[in-house]
Amino acid sequence: MSYADQVFIQNCKDILSKGVWDTDRPVRPKWEDGTPAHTVKRFGVINRYDLREEFPIITVRKQFLKSAVDELLWIWQKKSNDVSQLNSHVWDAWADEQGTIGKAYGYQLGVKHRYPEGEMDQVDRVLFDLKHNPTSRRILTNLYNHHDLNEMALYPCAYSMTFNVSGNTLNAILNQRSQDMLTANGWNVMQYAVLTHMLAQVSGLEVGELVHVIADAHIYDRHVPVVEELIARTPFDAPKFILDPSVTDFYDFTPASVKLEGYQAHALDQKIPVAV
């Protein structure tokens, strides 16, 4: 059983057995038929993944690593808000008439600021500090810009990454205000595990831990039967993660730069409804 499966299964069991339902309150999300999308949640979930031990990908439901990396690079490398630049359709429901998600996610990472060392955006600042000032305790990104929230199609869920170098080891903390456990937990964990691997490699560092802090970890009402089915399955062992060792510039990574060896996973034989 992969460690990511252990964490996912336990989180879901805790939410279902100890969580709080919001069925007594009005909620913003709705199902496609207009019905309110209620959730059961746990507050303040913290998970740690040692990326030196294994790659955190769940096997109780098949995950598509290259699609996840495509979205990750759309945000962190292209710094884009244009959904046409994605090879998947995960953002289509939030796109405006121009095909963008407004001033959200990649847009925020691409805004340049002036520093003593020159003009840089948030990603370039991280890359610069990891190489030139790794002892800094200020290496982080933040997508939750209150000034621009009214121009975002969706407020950022995974909104902050904090990077910390201990010795020659790069560790990271992913802060997430909201997590749809069924559709997004496995996706986000493997994405930011890959990002930590990538940044470590191009900075001449060893990869360490990814800590995932979730303020509101929830399961939607219509997802409960699917989640119950998933956590009753017998997981497989974690696969081996391979990152192209020839890449030394973060902006040269592509989805083809990542590979899994020995990945076995259960299929998901039904379409999962998405609350918007």
Image (cartoon, helix red, strand yellow):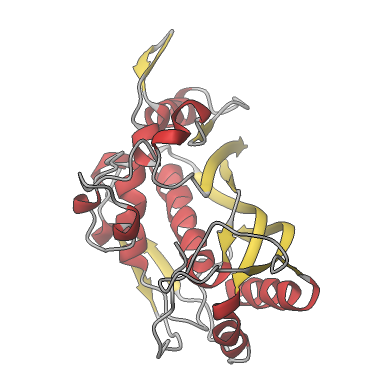
Residue 74 is situated, as x and y percent measured from the top left of the image, at 30, 48
Q: Which of the 4 image quadrants contains residue 23? A: bottom right
Task: Tell me if 175 is positioned left or right of 70 in this view.
Answer: right
Q: How many labels were placed on the picture?
A: 0
- Above or below, comparing residue 185 to residue 175 in the picture: below
- Above or below, comparing residue 23 to residue 74 in the picture: below
Residue 95 is situated, as x and y percent measured from the top left of the image, at 29, 51
Task: Tell me if 179 is positioned left or right of 239 in this view.
Answer: right
Q: Which of the 4 image quadrants contains residue 86? A: bottom left
Q: Residue furthest right?
A: 18
Which of these two is toward me, 143 or 141?
Answer: 143
Q: Which residue is rendered at x = 43% and y = 25% of the image?
A: 125
Q: Which residue is rendered at x = 43% and y = 43% of the image?
A: 199
The quadrant the N terminus occupies is bottom right
- Above or below, comparing residue 76 to residue 193 in the picture: above
Which of these two is toward me, 247 or 222?
Answer: 222
Residue 113 is situated, as x and y percent measured from the top left of the image, at 39, 17
Residue 212 is situated, as x and y percent measured from the top left of the image, at 62, 54
Which of these two is toward me, 169 or 214?
Answer: 214
The quadrant the C terminus occupies is bottom left
- Above or below, comparing residue 149 to residue 273 in the picture: above
Q: Which residue is rendered at x = 31% and y = 38% of the image?
A: 79
Which of these two is toward me, 49 or 84?
Answer: 84
**Residue 2 visible to the viewer:** no
**Residue 90 visible to the viewer:** yes
Task: Tell me if 101 is positioned left or right of 50 in this view.
Answer: left
